[in-house]
Image: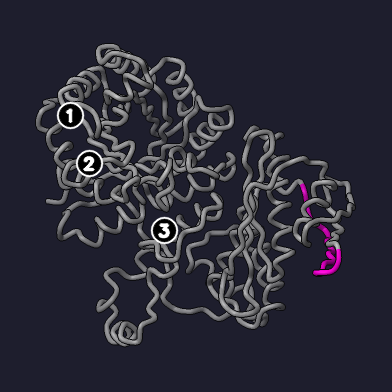
Amino acid sequence: MASKIEIFDTTLRDGEQSPGVSLNSYEKLEIAKQLAKLQVDVIEAGFPIASNGDFNAVKTIAENVKGPVIAGLARANFKDIDRAAEAVKAAERPRIHTFIASSPIHMKYKLKMTPEQVLEAAVEAVKRAKSYVEDVEFSAEDASRSEVEFLCKLFSAAINAGATVINIPDTVGYATPEEFGSLVKTLRERVPEMDKVKISVHCHNDLGMAVANSLAAVQNGATQIECAVNGLGERAGNAALEEVVMALVTRKDLYNVDLNIDTKHIYRTSKLVSTLSGIYVQPNKAIVGANAFAHESGIHQHGVLSEKSTYEIMTPESIGLSSNRLVLGKLSGRHAFAQRLKEMGYELDDEELNKAFERFKDLADKKKEITDKDIEALVEDQVLKIPQLIVLEYFQTSSGNQTISTATVKVKIGEKSVEEASTGDGPIDATYRALERACNIDCKLVDYSIKSVSGGKDAMGEVIVKIEKDGKLFTGRGLSTDIIEASALAYTNALNKTLWNNGNGR
């Protein structure tokens, strides 16, 4: 009989700790709604004590997202736990996830606490969390470098204090699959109370073994896997949700487990997280990379045309991709466009559909053929934006290798239109300086990247920028067949977020 494995998604908590990622509450809510469609069992919505913005995001998700358990992270102290309890209290199924480090190196150098003090703090933390919610998860940070005897005492005490989930993290990605699987098995056998709780694992990818370690844990009795979409997370990231899930699904003959996950939402979820986080998925990424279902070799192509399973161990349809290439153009109607969006996994209301169709028609005037990648990009660019406090109405640039680059821009801020001009080191720099003047916003450009969304000389360019203002990072995204326009739109989008942040808390 197959056992049940729960998927705990930490994209919005550990995933947001990826260097360069900063999501606002609107973006977090969009991702949480998509995770609910994916049918993850638990959404770790954030770390409420970290900031007012994080608290508000967790609270908003708890109030608006139904289905999964909504968890808030808290260190093993009352202040953190009280804040987390307040954030998740409106959830349909709330959980408080509290943790404390258990390895000798962490206790000595970071906590400056004795093992006895750590044990006492863990018990008091679990009891405090239990006074607010029934579902309490306890984690021993850096468990893979902890002494097994101490872990046994710690987990036994936490369970007796009321923990319903025990998490065994490989916090720094140090363990190998054989070691980690053995650790899970040992703890399960040596802690009598373990059969009363869910056994969770949280693996990092510092040595590239997060997914392998998670799967080894499943083979040794783990019943919950903590992971993040696209493998986002601290340093080298977490176990990638899409890889863990599809490994368990594709190799059910080996693992013999059941999941709640609706795998047809995997690609859509990956794309949404990539878009809002500003972190591209590399083409050769397993499951969701652009090349995951691409075949270039003649031998491979022949095999796939004869029988897909010759070179595809899973189907593109299983993760929400269509194997058919769609060609749409300027003569295509709204109905055909709406049907294709539905096939691609997008559920838009009438207003969103109208905006997307308008963008599609504009693009169709510039491109002869429009691919699924084009549609994907323009829909997410248009629909997934926060309310636009700044609108780029007009821009003009002049540049050359023997002249100073200049730019003139006109933006609408609320009901007021402002026009400014500036010079710069190239047309994009000049445009950005003019936009800063027009919006009266002083910021620093931290990162700029551009890529082609689809092939051909008329391909759309996607620009992602990251700016820093008042110590916070804001990501902007722009899309156009004109790379100067895409750059201007991306910067405007990022500037807009700085204003939206000031007025909406995150």
- Give amino acid for label 2: Thr
Tag of residue 461: none
Residue 233 in the image, given as x and y percentages of width and height: 43, 43
Residues marked 1 and 2 touching at CB (< 8 Å): no
- Could you say whether the residue bearing mark 2 is in a helix, strand or loop? loop
Q: Are marks 3 and 2 in contact (CB under 8 Å)?
A: no
Q: Residues within 10 Å of mark 1 (few under 14, many from 20)?
A: few
Tag 2 residue: 223
Queried whether the magenta region covers residue 312, the answer comes back as no
Residue 387 coordinates in the image, percent (x, y): 69, 47
Q: Position of residue 365 (x, y in %)?
A: 71, 78
**Residue at the farthest front position:** 402
Which region is colored magenta?
390-403
Q: Does residue 159 appear left or right of residue 139 in this picture?
A: left
Q: Amino acid at mark 3?
A: His
Circle 3 residues within 10 Å: few <14, some 14–19, many ≥20: many
Q: List the residue tagged with mark 3.
A: 265
Most frequent secondary structure within the magenta stretch: strand
**In the image, is residue 5 above or below residue 284?**
above
Q: Which residue is mark 1?
A: 196
